[in-house]
């Protein structure tokens, strides 16, 4: 498997674009994106578990009922959520794309992100559709920019892999900076691949993958209303179709995981106001479920996140988060260390503190990426969760989000 350029346009048969159509007041920011497959593609999606869901999710679920799609349209600046006419607007977005591309509206995935509870005016989208479609090409970067809200950086990447002796490609773009929390974490992710796979297996691969990727990240503990991860697989590589589990399916799942985990890291690294990416690695758990519970509890701890912002090796906050996680474990067996590019330092052994150099710990915790390593000493279960530090800027950003 090799990382390559191209994002959602790396796979054969995909084009993309993103423009400013007028949804957002800032004309320098793109506010709508379109991804198109030259042929109808197998499709699968997973959605937020928040009971309050954006209208685009309801429309997309209906459109993907048959397991196929040809295009994805997404606007930023307005979530189209909690609006009386939300589904009608989302359907109209699909109709506009369908009319411009001469495809069925039911083959269009629709998504929105931005402020909740404000009506989405369809007029800018209607006026901008011709320009959006005309500019379709190898513009994954434009599409990635078109779905950003408080994001400070584009999130896109791609990999090549092999199925049946044929090269296949898979790539993705994502948005996510705030309202990020495990349980179908808050973000939008669009993935494209030229591998051939049945809709049933594609759905299984994606549903299994998010358990160890997007459901293992957290920025602020808030699960949003518009979360969605969508994958389109058009088979343009010419590789044999994956119709059953086995070597080819495993290769596809590994490539999908490479994309999703890379995007996970990009999302939390760009958390609102964040200065550090946190990775909690748990080993020695009695089960994978216990390891996941502990890892997520650690990266979700506001106290620990604040300590990491201050480069304070306050390991007691790690133990505290483990203790209230709800996982059944023996605290007297817990070991903790912090590590980064500056080295690794043990801070807790068998549930108790050990002597360590505060000076070295400070150097380690001043780095941009920090690992919190936890050993539970009770089994073979392991898991990784990703998060970020909690800074003053998080409050500033969310204090005037609507303006």
Image: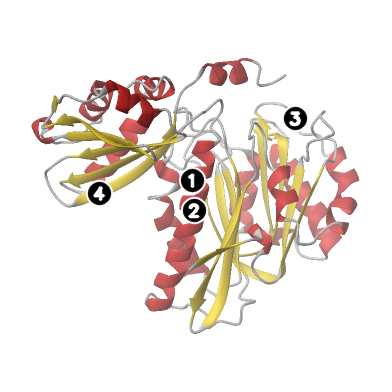
What residue is disc 3 on? 119
Label 3, label 4: how far apart the Cα atoms are: 45 Å
Along the line of sight, which residue is nearer the eye, 135 or 357? 357
Q: Do callouts 2 and 3 mark residues in contact (Cβ within 8 Å)?
A: no
- Which of the numbered marks, if any, corresponds to residue 260? 2
Label 2, label 4: how far apart the Cα atoms are: 18 Å
Q: Secondary structure at mark 4?
A: strand
What residue is disc 1 on? 264
- Which circle, 2 or 3, is nearer the viewer? 2
Horizontal side of 346 relative to 139 (left or right) equals: left
Among the 4 quarters of the image, the one containing residue 3: bottom right
Label 1, label 2: how far apart the Cα atoms are: 6 Å
Along the line of sight, which residue is nearer the eye, 162 or 35? 162
What residue is disc 4 on? 382
Q: Secondary structure at mark 1?
A: helix
- Measured as percent of width and height from the top left, residue 213 is found at 42, 49
Decide: is 245 above or below 388: below
- Which of the numbered marks, if any, corresponds to residue 157? none
**Sequence-earlier tag: 3 or 4:** 3
Q: Identify the residue shown where x is 46% and y is 69%.
A: 252
Along the line of sight, which residue is nearer the eye, 112 or 53? 112
Horizontal side of 396 relative to 384 (left or right) equals: right
**Sequence-earlier tag: 2 or 4:** 2
Label 2, label 3: how far apart the Cα atoms are: 32 Å
Using the rendered image of the protein, determine whether residue 67 is visible from the camera's viewpoint.
no
């Amino acid at each position: 498997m090799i990382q390559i350029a191209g994002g959602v346009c790396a796979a054969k048969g995909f084009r993309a674009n993103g423009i400013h159509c007028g949804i957002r007041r800032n004309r320098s920011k793109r506010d709508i994106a379109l991804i198109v497959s030259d042929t109808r593609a197998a499709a699968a999606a997973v959605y937020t578990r928040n009971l309050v869901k954006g209208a685009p999710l309801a429309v997309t679920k209906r459109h993907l009922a048959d397991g196929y799609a040809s295009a994805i349209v997404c606007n930023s600046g307005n979530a189209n959520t909690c609006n009386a006419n939300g589904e009608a607007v989302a359907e109209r977005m699909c109709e506009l794309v369908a009319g411009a591309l001469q495809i069925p509206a039911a083959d269009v995935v629709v998504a929105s992100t931005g402020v909740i509870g404000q009506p989405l005016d369809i007029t800018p989208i209607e006026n901008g559709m011709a320009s959006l479609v005309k500019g379709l090409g190898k513009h994954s970067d434009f599409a990635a920019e078109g779905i950003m809200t408080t994001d400070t950086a584009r999130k896109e990447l791609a990999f090549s892999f092999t199925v049946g002796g044929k090269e296949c490609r898979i790539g993705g773009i994502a948005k996510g900076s705030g309202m990020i929390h495990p349980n179908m974490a808050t973000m939008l992710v669009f993935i494209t691949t030229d591998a051939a796979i049945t809709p049933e297996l594609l759905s299984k691969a994606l549903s299994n993958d998010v358990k160890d990727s997007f459901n293992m990240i957290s920025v602020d503990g808030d699960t949003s209303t518009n979360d969605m991860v969508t994958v389109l697989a058009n088979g343009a590589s010419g590789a044999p179709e994956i119709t059953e589990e086995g070597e080819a399916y495993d290769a596809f799942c590994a490539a999908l995981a490479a994309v999703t985990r890379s995007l996970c890291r990009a999302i939390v690294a760009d958390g609102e106001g964040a200065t550090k990416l946190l990775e909690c690695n748990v080993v020695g758990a009695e089960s994978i479920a216990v390891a996941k519970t502990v890892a997520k509890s650690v990266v979700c701890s506001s106290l620990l996140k604040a300590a990491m912002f201050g480069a304070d090796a306050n390991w007691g906050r790690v133990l505290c988060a483990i203790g209230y996680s709800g996982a059944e474990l023996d605290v007297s067996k817990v070991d903790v260390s912090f590590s980064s590019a500056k080295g690794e330092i043990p801070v807790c052994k068998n549930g108790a503190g050990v002597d360590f150099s505060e000076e070295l710990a400070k150097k380690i915790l001043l780095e941009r990426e920090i690992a919190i390593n936890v050993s539970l000493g009770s089994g073979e279960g392991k898991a990784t969760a990703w998060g970020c530090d909690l800074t003053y800027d998080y409050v500033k950003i969310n204090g005037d989000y609507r303006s």
